[in-house]
């Protein structure tokens, strides 16, 4: 398994991974454009040159960064790929001068983010806009 920071993004390949990981319909999105514009960094996990994992980090341009879209293809789950993606992304955010790395997650991912990746629980709020 190789982990590549800011790899050249193929929109279809990343959209396919995202759909498989989140069990959703395939909708090809302009990932490359979005990442170049809004992300501090992103990391891909590659097995035999095939993208099998992904995470991105967005930021406020200062102390705060945010983990988004952590995805591992179901065929490659439970092998530590997601953890390594997040830890690599955290290192990148730290190296960029960020002081805090935030993540929001659904309850079934609590053990992954808190136990495996080392996040600590905090109080937070969420406002649904659509």
Image (spheres, rainbow, N blue to C red):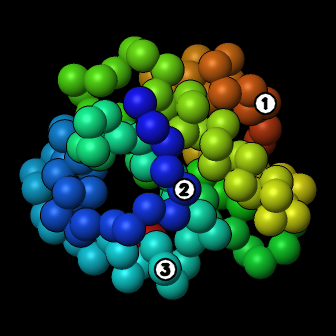
CB atoms at circles 1 and 3 under 8 Å apart?
A: no
Image point (57%, 31%), residue name? 84
Quadrant of the rendered image containing residue 63: bottom right
Residue matched to label 3: 36
Image point (40%, 15%), residue name? 78
Spatial CA span between label 1 and label 3:
29 Å
On the picture, is 130 further left or further right than 16? Answer: right
Residue 13 pos. (x, y %): 20, 57
Up-down: is 9 above or below 34? above
Q: Earlier in the sequence, mark 1 or mark 3?
A: 3
Residue 23 pos. (x, y %): 19, 38
| Helix, strand or loop under label 2 | strand
Residue 58 pos. (x, y %): 61, 66
For the image shown, how many numbered marks are present on the structure? 3
Residue 120, numbered circle: 1
Q: Earlier in the sequence, mark 2 or mark 3?
A: 2
| Helix, strand or loop under label 3 | helix
* Visible residue check, residue 125: no
Judged by depth in the image, the label closer to the viewer, 1 or 3, is: 3
Spatial CA span between label 2 and label 1:
25 Å
* Front one among 4 and 36: 4
Judged by depth in the image, the label closer to the viewer, 2 or 1, is: 2
Residue 5, numbered circle: 2
CB atoms at circles 2 and 1 under 8 Å apart?
A: no
On the picture, is 45 further left or further right than 95? Answer: left
Image point (77%, 41%), residue name? 123
* Front one among 113 and 121: 113
Up-down: is 11 above or below 55? below
Q: Earlier in the sequence, mark 2 or mark 1?
A: 2
Image point (54%, 56%), residue name? 5
Quadrant of the rendered image containing residue 20: top left
């Amino acid at each position: 398994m190789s982990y590549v920071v800011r790899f050249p993004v193929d929109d279809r390949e990343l959209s396919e991974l995202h759909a498989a990981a989140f069990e959703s319909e395939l909708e090809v999105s302009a990932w490359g454009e979005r990442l170049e514009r809004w992300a501090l960094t992103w990391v891909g996990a590659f097995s035999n040159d095939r993208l099998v994992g992904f995470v991105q980090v967005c930021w406020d341009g200062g102390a705060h960064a945010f983990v988004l879209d952590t995805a591992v293809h179901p065929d490659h789950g439970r092998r530590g790929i997601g953890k390594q993606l997040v830890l690599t992304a955290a290192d990148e955010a730290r190296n960029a001068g960020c002081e805090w790395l935030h993540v929001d997650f659904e309850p079934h991912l609590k053990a992954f983010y808190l136990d495996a990746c080392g996040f600590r629980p905090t109080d937070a709020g969420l406002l649904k806009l659509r």
